[in-house]
Amino acid sequence: MAPKTDPNYKVIAENRRARFDYAIESDLEVGIMLTGSEVKALRTGQANIAESYASIENGELWLINSYISTYLQAGVFGHDERRHRKLLVSRKELARLWAAVGREGMTLVPLVMYFNHRGLVKLKIGVAKGKKLADKRETSAKRDWNRQKQRLLKQNQ
């Protein structure tokens, strides 16, 4: 029997470039504080997290430079498209992230923004280290080789 898909789970925005530019060490699911018009705009799928990043400021985790388009029906109760949005994590996780960024020189990169099975907006952030140009070439070469391998296997069957 095929597994049932969750009707509430929906990917809103994905940062596909992050896995190419960064070596992701670990990832973490966090909540995000949004206004009503932002949630309505996200339901229509109008968001971009490609140029955004997460930062720890004044003991809180913030999502910076993410784009959520305006919701026209909100009128005067709308929101700023590129405002800083607070991310919700436990104190223990915040301390771990702060140590990774401060001591180890890691970067907090948003990977995926989605609605979870309960219909809440969640963000998956990755603790990452930037790749050098040679590492990016190696990743590209590996991906090309795997593609070539799949073609050869398909032809032999």
Image (spheres, rainbow, N blue to C red):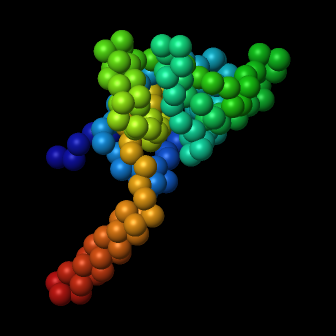
Q: Is residue 142 visible?
A: yes
111, 128: nearer the viewer: 128
Residue 113 drawn at (x, y percent): 48, 36
Left or right position of 34 against 103: right
Name which quarter of the figure residue 52 lies in: top right
Farthest bottom residue in view: 156
Give the residue drawn at x 38%, y 19%.
94
Determine whether, in the image, residue 54 is placed left or right of residue 97: right
Report the residue at 43% width, 59% height from top: 132
Residue 124 in percent (x, y) is at 41, 34
Residue 45 visible? The answer is no
Relative side of 156 to 6, left or right: left
* Quadrant where the C terminus is found in the figure: bottom left
Up/down of 107 relative to 130, above or below: above
Q: Residue furthest front?
A: 103
- Residue 41 in the image, given as x and y percentages of width and height: 65, 31
